[in-house]
Image (tube, coloured by chain):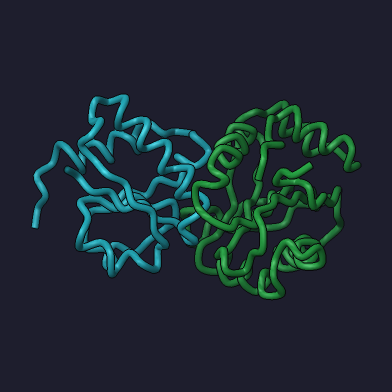
Chain colours: A green, B cyan
Amino acid sequence: MSDMFDAKIALFHQDVQGKEAALKLLAEEFMKSGVAKETFYDGLIAREKNYATGLTLNNMCVAIPHTDPEHVNRTQVGFMSLKEPVEFIEMGTDDKKIPVTMMFMLALKEAHQQLDMLMKLMDVFQNDELMEKFRNVDNYEDYYRLIEEAGLNMEG
Amino acid sequence: MKRILLCCATGVATSTVVHKRVEEELKRRGYNGQFTITQCKVAEVPGQSPNYDLCVSTVAMDAKNCACPIVIATNLIINRGTEPIYNEIENKLFKEETAE
């Protein structure tokens, strides 16, 4: 099956300290699997420093770390939930710190190709019930069931 | 024809989402066929902006790097508190005389 989740990059309830460690842990999964290039993590960090990716939702804060397509081999979405929140800067601000408990890391190859999935993902962010389930899920099978429930498992 | 420059940090992610939303809302408000939208990276804005009527950005941006009016549209990403942003875009694009 080929969708934007087929590399099975998902980590649950991780115990990490700080944004860099959190980004690194998940980015390494992208690099190990060949979804992203060796430069992916550095690209994420550089981007996060200049333009943060934290988003404040109704009941929680999430981040959607991503970087330039040149660091990416193919389009995929990875997920990580955190035991304790880490501080991200909110997107659209220079300095507003928000406590992020989940990351949806995006490896994006080009514009438009992934539009439908991104639009769906933003709808999911507005669905408090579904977000609560993502917060609680602790294994890949249940996680992928949520992806299907959310309608995110579309062709990459 | 009004020209909108839509930017985000990478030019492929949040600007793609906001592109779609702005396009649909402006059509809904009756401006179909009266505008074009081009996506770019925020780093390209200083060079590109002289050719545009409005820059819509999903990330914070310094106005002095942009030659046209700016609307910061981060909230459009997750579709929250969108009305004031759409109003600002409509006003700056179709209702205000461009002050030089």
Near-viewer residue (A59 or B42): B42
Near-viewer residue (B64 or A59): B64
- Up the image or down, A119 lies above or below A128; here it is below
Query: Is A146 placed left or right of B38 in the picture?
Result: right
Q: For residue B85, what is the image quadrant?
A: top left
Q: Residue at x 58, y 42 (%)?
A: A118
Q: For residue A69, what is the image quadrant?
A: bottom right
Q: Residue at x 31, y 53 (%)?
A: B5
Residue A84, image x and y in percent?
Answer: 80, 52
Q: Residue at x 76, y 62 (%)?
A: A30
- Up the image or down, A41 lies above or below B57; here it is below
Q: For residue A151, what is the image quadrant?
A: top right
Residue A61, image x and y in percent?
Answer: 65, 45
Q: Residue at x 45, y 46 (%)?
A: B74
In the picture, the quarter occupied by the N terminus of chain A is top right
Query: Is B71 placed left or right of A36 in the picture?
Result: left
Residue A11, image x and y in percent?
Answer: 84, 52
Query: Is B24 placed left or right of A59 in the picture?
Result: left
- Up the image or down, B31 lies above or below A104; here it is above
In the picture, the quarter occupied by the C terminus of chain A is top right
Please indicate, yes or no, whether residue A18 appears anywhere in the rendered image. no
Query: Is A7 placed left or right of B13 in the picture?
Result: right
Residue B47, image x and y in percent?
Answer: 28, 69
Please indicate, yes or no, whether residue A151 appears anywhere in the rendered image. yes
Counting labels gives 0
- Up the image or down, B25 lies above or below B13; here it is above
Near-viewer residue (A18 or B37): B37
